Amino acid sequence: MEKAQLQEGPRRPGRHQRDGGILLVIKNNVILTVVVAVITTYLLSSQWHAPRPQEHHRYTNQLDATGLEYGIAQCALNQRRPVVDKNLASSRLAARSSVGPRTILHNATLIDGDGTITLESTIVIQDGIFTKVSKAPVDDLLEPASPDDRVINLQGRIVTPGLVDAHSHAGVRETPQLWATEDVTEISAPVTPWARAVDALKPHDRAIPVIASGGVTTSLVLTGAKNQISGEGVVIKMKWANSVRDMLVNTTGSGGGKPQRYLKMAMGENQKRQFENSASGPSTRLGESYWFRKAYDEAARLKRRQDRWCEAASTAQGLTSITQEYPRSLEWQTLVDVLRGDVRVNVHGYETEDILAMFDHADEFGFNITALHHALHADLVMDQIKTRNIAVVGFSDSWGDKKELYNVSSYLPRRIAENGIPFVLTRDHPALHGQWLIYEAQIAHHFGLDAESTISSVISLPARLLGLDNRIGFVRPGYDGDLVVWDRHPLQVGAHPLEVYIDGKSVTRASDSLWKTSESLSYTREAPISRPSDEPETTCRSGQSNIVIRGLKMSFVGVDGLRIKEPETGNMTVVVRAGRIVCVGGNKCDHVARQAAEDNVPSMDLPKNGYMLPGLTVVTRQHGLTEMRQEPSTADGFSAGEDYASPLSSRFGIKFDGIHLGRAYRSGVARIVTPPLTEGFFHGTSTLFRAGAKSVLDDGAIAKPKVALHFTIGHSAKSSLTPSITSQISKLRELLTVDKYINPVYQSAARGEIPVVVHTNNKDVIAHMVALKKETGAHIVIMGGSEAHLVAAELAEAVVPVIVAPFWGCEPLFWDSRNCLPGPPLTDRLGPQVLIDAGVKVGISNWDDTNNHIRNSIWEASWVAGPGNRSLALDLVSKNIEDILQLPRSRDFVVYEGDPFNFGAKVALIFEEGKVQSCYPDVDEN
Ligand SMILES: *[C@@H]1O[C@H](CO)[C@@H](O)[C@H](O)[C@H]1NC(C)=O
Ligand SMILES: *[C@@H]1O[C@H](CO)[C@@H](O)[C@H](O)[C@H]1NC(C)=O
Ligand SMILES: *[C@@H]1O[C@H](CO)[C@@H](O)[C@H](O)[C@H]1NC(C)=O
Ligand SMILES: *[C@@H]1O[C@H](CO)[C@@H](O)[C@H](O)[C@H]1NC(C)=O
Ligand SMILES: *[C@@H]1O[C@H](CO)[C@@H](O)[C@H](O)[C@H]1NC(C)=O
Ligand SMILES: *[C@@H]1O[C@H](CO)[C@@H](O)[C@H](O)[C@H]1NC(C)=O
């Protein structure tokens, strides 16, 4: 880092200052006097008091006029802090000169940024801002309506202010990700406070309008977290622009003053990983703290030098002694500004040791922290966070991938918020696709964060964190015209915007048919409930093979545990005798239920809203084989993917413990299919196993040892024997034709007896697979399938099923999936919906490398199926997977309290292998 230290300028021979500044000699004292007089007048008008130089004072060895002027101006600025101008909205309203056309939205249900609800609202947008927000009927507002006005009766639909994502990399980590556009962290050094996100911002990032279509209208674009002080962030509006300038939010308040600024710092595993092999380090947290302290020490010295300069310049006497220019440094000024309190400090970190170390550094150097980002273990150090008045910018459902986010409480958002700490949700786009910030919020709400706090966590609180709650985060007169019209309550499964306004302009509007659909009654305008936390009294006990369950409202399971096509509804009772369901229904079960009571069979009464479903079956890429993806010792290990002659099965690698299986199981996922791990092209054969088994010795633990052959075709699978897509497809074709005799499994595959699962997103690879099926007759299954909708008709015709993963089929992180469908409001249908409409058999699963989302499968299926089509939703995560992979039918069942197809339900009972396995499990328990 020596090279980063600043030489402040060329030195003049013969005149040395102790701290090595330069000396500039001015010859014309007259000019100097005039300049100083002008500056002084300026300064007296602000708060800083500079001396009045005496008219005929003699200056010697002086700095030139520009240098002095610059320094004195800096000294004045040093006295001022950025302020949030609370009068901005009213001054904007007053200052309005142009009177452009109005957009008048009426009969709207306004959920404001803090969650308060106002029915029958009328909202007027004009000249980019809200000009009227009231309960008045529209007629009263139309002081003669101009023909250019747009008047929209929302018929009670919900509107919210635009969502705000306080942690995004949109524009600096463009998607699809390419080497050429990766500009998020300047990793040439561990600390680069001089870097600025604005310099790398790409207005043509295709993700920006897609994110806006999810209702996100403002984002704080931060530099990355690969090094420790990665630089300054920038606030943008999520609108399509041709120039960076058109996206930026002017964070300077109307009263002049300083702009709001944002620094990004990071601690923990990323930095160790990034600099492990560099001579400078850090390779441990020891080194991380050293690099922080060194950087702030540098800044503190510079600040002291500046303050001494300003002190000298504050008296006439001192002014005469100034011989060098105001100390400055391009490298360290940002951190000096942090020490002065001009910058909002955003710290990435997960573990409590990282958070506490950062508190130490803040105390040592005297800076404040605005927000702890991610901070998924913040619930363990809440007192300190609260005392320091720091916000937490977290996730609701990111865990497992590495040690620092391994065992995160599902109730983290609720815990933090209930302790009075501002809790904000983010997507960290593209780590999680920024379009679905509202999904992050929905999950937090499911796990107990109340509806107002949840809405606040994605609207008003992030606006406040940015110091911009004087113009965004609320629908108030004078605020930015950023508004989202929702098709249903935004916390409902599958909610999406119908129209999004940014700065008063409609940037996305759904098709008329989507507007029409949103009128149908099934789209609810109420928030779903949160998960009930109280466990009812129950006589349900693990191990029981006889039980009577009362109070069921809907059942998809019939006698003998078999799936029934359309659900039975009513006030039903289930009677289980000797491990078998003998009756499901209303009065018709009275007799057997009475008999059971006489036999002292325990009974369970569901308080209100019972649902019975088969245990879900999902396909994953690593469940059971990996705990922390980034810790090799917690994984089964990766083959080179080239051992074709003796394909391995994953059956011997499955570990029946850990939080990934546990949390999925306790959410209703009973069976999982996972192929062996590989770094290459060929995985081997997958295994069907019970997520809830204690070990391989448990009944039915391995339900089917050889489910399917799995191949990954794509960039990630390039290895020495299959270094190209061409070689991968050729090899697969050979294994199904000329080479099939190297192992009987390929002969079975060529006869269609064992499925061949091909993991790919790319439309052309998928088309080749259709051709390969036609040529060989193999039962080829596509998994991934982001671009499958482009060949939907061909897939249907050739009867090639698709297991879509991740569920919405559109997270265009990489080139191979760039043509995925973003879904409403940009496109009428999601990719999997197009496939279903075309007649393709579809399953929904998980291809999530962070390995946590499979417990959400039922919601994601429900999202794809649409409200009111629970049969389809359930098929997507059970029957269709069984059909596609030729699995034995499940006879397990799971009873939920609440509607599992929506948020807020809780598993009440899991019944497998002829007995009750679990009663009211908590999702986090071990
Ligand atoms: C407002 O919307 C509701 C539906 O939520 C509708 O019943 C009512 O007629 C609408 N009112 C007006 C004035 O359009
Ligand atoms: C930002 O807003 C302030 C206050 O309205 C104004 O003085 C300044 O010129 C603006 N800056 C830009 C770059 O538009
Ligand atoms: C830190 O916050 C405290 C309390 O708000 C404030 O008094 C102090 O000036 C701040 N310091 C800096 C460097 O921002
Ligand atoms: C996860 O954390 C919880 C709560 O601290 C603890 O009870 C549990 O044992 C932990 N589980 C694992 C696998 O570390
Ligand atoms: C459902 O039926 C039971 C009798 O089996 C009865 O006690 C209960 O009140 C009924 N519940 C509802 C909501 O009708
Ligand atoms: C559910 O979706 C399937 C597939 O699109 C369709 O055939 C079925 O009619 C739908 N059922 C309902 C109740 O909408």
Image (spheres, helix red, strand yellow):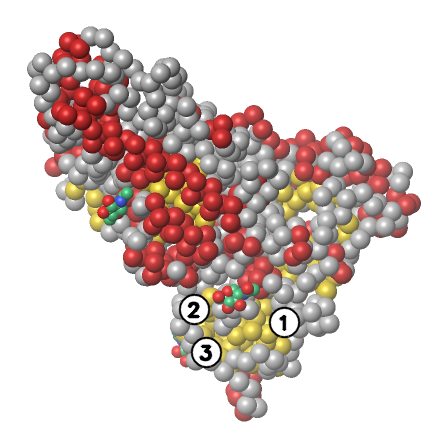
Q: Are marks 3 and 2 in contact (CB under 8 Å)?
A: no
Q: Decide: is 353 above or below 547.
A: above
Q: Position of residue 47 (x, y in %)?
A: 13, 32
**Residue 789 visible:** no
Q: What residue would you read off at disc 2?
A: 609
Q: Secondary structure at mark 3?
A: strand
Q: Secondary structure at mark 2?
A: strand
Q: Amino acid at mark 3?
A: Asp
Q: Position of residue 293 (x, y in %)?
A: 42, 43
- Mark 2 burial class by Cα count in 10 Å: few <14, some 14-19, many 20+: some
Residue occupying the point 20% across, 29% down: 312
Q: Amino acid at mark 2?
A: Asn
Examine the image and state in which quarter residue 444 appears.
bottom left
Q: What residue would you read off at disc 3?
A: 605
| Marked residue nearer the N-terminal end (3 or 1) | 3
Tell which of 525 and 318 is nearer to you.
Answer: 318
Q: Are marks 3 and 1 in contact (CB under 8 Å)?
A: no
- Mark 1 burial class by Cα count in 10 Å: few <14, some 14-19, many 20+: many
Q: Amino acid at mark 1?
A: Glu
Q: Is 666 displayed left or right of 139 in the figure?
A: right
Gap in angstroms between the C-alphas marked 2 and 1: 22 Å
Q: Decide: is 650 above or below 714.
A: below
Q: Secondary structure at mark 1?
A: strand
Tell which of 868 and 816 is nearer to you.
Answer: 816
Tell which of 454 and 220 is nearer to you.
Answer: 220
User: Where does the C terminus fall, quadrant-wise?
Assistant: bottom right
| Marked residue nearer the N-terminal end (2 or 1) | 2
Gap in angstroms between the C-alphas marked 3 and 1: 20 Å
Q: Is 926 displayed left or right of 163 in the figure?
A: right
Q: What residue would you read off at disc 1?
A: 912
Q: Position of residue 258 (x, y in %)?
A: 24, 31
